């Protein structure tokens, strides 16, 4: 990543630096470069997790637990 500092407009100096990050996980270019994260969970898996969480929450609300 390249960063420029917000220097004064009348200054002839430009300050910039480079940040280098090691690749530590399998993120795609969108996630790494733009901060846009993609959901890699299938709809079936997400529905299963959501249904399970909803059933547990409902059971706790009505006192079945």
Image (cartoon, grey):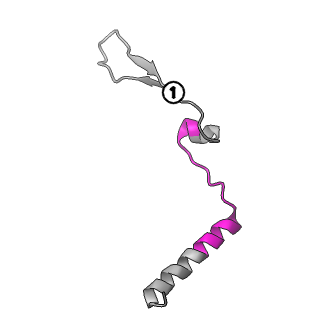
Q: Is residue 29 above or below residue 44?
A: above
Residue count near mark 1 (Cα–Cα under 10 Å), binned few <14, some 14–19, many ≥20:
few
Indicate the secondary structure of the residue bearing disc 1: loop
Magenta stretch containing residue 41, yes or no? yes
| Image x and y of residue 57, in percent | 49, 80
User: Residue at 31% across / 17% down in the picture?
Assistant: 9
57 on left or right of 50? left
Q: How many marks?
A: 1
Instruction: Pick out the residue farthest to the front.
Output: 65
User: Residue at 61% across / 41% down in the picture?
Assistant: 25
Q: Nearer the viewer, residue 26 or 38?
A: 26
Magenta stretch containing residue 37, yes or no? yes
Q: Nearer the viewer, residue 41 or 65?
A: 65
| Image x and y of residue 14, in percent | 38, 14
| Span shown in magenta | 32-51
Residue wearing tag 1: 1
Q: Is residue 61 above or below residue 1?
A: below
Q: Nearer the viewer, residue 6 or 60?
A: 60
| Image x and y of residue 40, in percent | 66, 54
User: Residue at 52% across / 80% down in the picture?
Assistant: 56
50 on left or right of 3? right
Determine the image quadrant of residue 49.
bottom right
């Amino acid at each position: 990543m390249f960063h420029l500092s917000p220097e004064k407009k009348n200054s002839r100096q430009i300050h910039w630096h480079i940040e280098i990050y090691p690749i530590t996980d399998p993120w795609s270019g969108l996630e790494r470069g733009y901060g846009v994260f993609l959901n890699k969970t299938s709809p079936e898996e997400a529905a299963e997790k959501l249904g399970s969480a909803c059933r547990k929450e409902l059971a706790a609300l009505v006192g079945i637990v």
